[in-house]
Image (cartoon, rainbow, N blue to C red):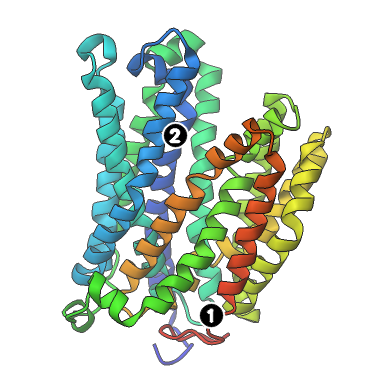
């Protein structure tokens, strides 16, 4: 597009494309996180042990394995998207997530097939890890290319609206089942229901994605460097390192104030588990709603300025916020403090995919975005909880606060390397 004018039909097509791409993103993250929320119920079925902690550690290990597959997924699906089209990559990734969920829903237990049960659970989780690793880069690339000029920040923000929405829906489904079924029913068969829901939702998303139009063209797909690791690093090493640098801090602070925060409120602040769940559900809902507003802000002030604000505010306020949350007793005050932290994180998450996509040309865009994100996310996001809990057991919990602060300072420094104007996507900042 060389003009910011769009016909009504063109606007409708692009908005539908955003909906189609982001619907799959929601399903992917629902399926990925429902595992974590249901683990307490299915752990005994796959890892028989007298110690519930051992069971949960085993399921957590399988969860972590899903994270480790993300870089491989980022590479495979990034190459697929750059060489064979964004649409094909989007369809295959959601189909793989469907297969993984359906597999878990139908798995026989340890009592039926012995050690094959946990082995097959691990296989299903690895399939899901590959899928979600490829989903991020391709969705970010597709949404950045299809979004309306001058409103790219706003439209691209729906990637994280649906990412957070997937987590919230996973919690909601489990809460509903807890109201409808007894504890014994949930442990016997009820835990399978969310995985069936996820598989069906993935098929619906697949149908939506079938109607998407392709945003790449034959010229870029046939380029000798298309989807090539050598092409990526020969010509775009600096861009890759820049994206890796600020994504490391972004992933770490995101997981610190989302998935880890509920445990932090209970284990460190001593809050009642139920109150901590209410606080985090409310905070995540607000976080989801904030994304389009911060995306619109980036359209006005520029992607670089949003990222600099993210790095600077994260560096200044991470320690004070975590220190305040350490001794918080009021659920309302905890909600306010976490919401302030998530406002800072929103400067990054709302444009996370877009600011990466703008760094790479179309022939290596999905690969560059997906691989950089997956590597940084697996190393720093996926390890956040383990590092935090490990330092706590050593009596060095405050060290974790400074670790996050240090990574935010690094994110700020790498954000200084961002160009004032996007190198490869035209926009009107």
Mark toward the start of the polypeptide (2 vs 1): 2
Q: Position of residue 345 (x, y in %)?
A: 63, 58
Query: At 56% across and 70% down in the image, what residue appears?
Result: 154
Residue annotated with mark 2: 34
The answer to whether the residue labelled 2 contacts the one labelled 1, judged by CB atoms less than 8 Å apart, is no
Q: Position of residue 104 (x, y in %)?
A: 30, 29
Query: At 24% across and 58% down in the image, what residue appears?
Result: 76
Within 10 Å of disc 2 (Cα), the crowding (few <14, some 14-19, many 20+) is many
**Residue 96: image tag:** none
Q: CA distance from mark 2 to mark 1?
A: 36 Å
Q: Secondary structure at mark 2?
A: helix
Residue annotated with mark 1: 418
Within 10 Å of disc 1 (Cα), the crowding (few <14, some 14-19, many 20+) is many
Determine whether, in the image, residue 411 is placed left or right of residue 279. Answer: left
Determine whether, in the image, residue 84 is placed left or right of residue 179. Answer: left
Determine if residue 211 is in view: no
- Quadrant location of the N terminus in the rendered image: bottom left
Determine if residue 35 is in view: yes
Q: Secondary structure at mark 1?
A: loop
């Amino acid at each position: 597009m060389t003009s910011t004018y769009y016909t009504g039909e063109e606007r409708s097509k692009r908005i539908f494309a955003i909906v189609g791409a982001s619907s799959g993103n929601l399903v992917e993250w629902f399926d990925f996180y429902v595992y974590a929320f249901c683990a307490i119920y299915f752990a005994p079925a796959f890892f028989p042990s007298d110690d519930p902690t051992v069971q949960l550690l085993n399921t957590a290990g399988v969860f972590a394995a899903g994270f480790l597959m993300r870089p491989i997924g980022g590479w495979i699906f990034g190459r697929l998207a750059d060489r064979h089209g964004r649409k094909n990559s989007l369809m295959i990734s959601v189909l793989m997530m469907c297969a993984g969920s359906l597999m878990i829903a139908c798995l026989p237990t340890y009592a039926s097939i012995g050690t094959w049960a946990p082995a097959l659970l691990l296989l299903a989780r690895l399939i899901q890890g590959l899928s979600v690793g490829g989903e991020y880069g391709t969705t970010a690339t597709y949404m950045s290319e299809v979004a309306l000029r001058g409103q790219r920040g706003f439209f691209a923000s729906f990637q994280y609206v649906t990412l957070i929405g997937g987590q919230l829906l996973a919690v909601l489904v489990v809460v509903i089942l807890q109201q409808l079924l007894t504890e014994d029913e949930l442990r016997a068969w009820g835990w399978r229901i969310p995985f069936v829901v996820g598989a069906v939702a993935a098929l619906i998303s697949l149908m939506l994605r079938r109607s998407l139009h392709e945003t790449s063209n034959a010229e870029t797909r046939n380029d000798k460097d298309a989807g090539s690791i050598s092409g990526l690093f020969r010509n775009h090493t600096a861009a890759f390192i820049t994206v890796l640098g600020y994504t490391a801090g972004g992933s770490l602070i995101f997981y610190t104030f989302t998935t880890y925060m509920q445990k932090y409120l209970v284990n460190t602040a001593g809050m009642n588990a139920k109150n901590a769940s209410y606080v985090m559900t409310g905070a995540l809902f607000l976080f989801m709603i904030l994304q389009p507003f911060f995306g619109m802000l980036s359209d006005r002030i520029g992607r670089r300025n949003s990222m600099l604000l993210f790095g600077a505010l994260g560096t200044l306020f991470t320690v004070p916020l975590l220190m305040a949350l350490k001794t918080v007793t009021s659920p309302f005050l905890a909600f306010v403090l976490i919401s302030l932290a998530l406002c800072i994180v929103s400067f990054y998450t709302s444009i996370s995919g877009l600011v990466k996509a703008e760094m790479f040309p179309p022939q290596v865009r999905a690969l560059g975005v997906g691989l950089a994100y997956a590597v940084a996310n697996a190393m720093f996001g996926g390890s956040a909880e383990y590092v935090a809990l490990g330092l706590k057991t050593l009596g060095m919990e405050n060290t974790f606060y400074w670790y996050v602060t240090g990574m935010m300072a690094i994110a700020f420094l790498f954000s200084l390397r961002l160009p004032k104007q996007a190198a490869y996507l035209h926009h009107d900042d």
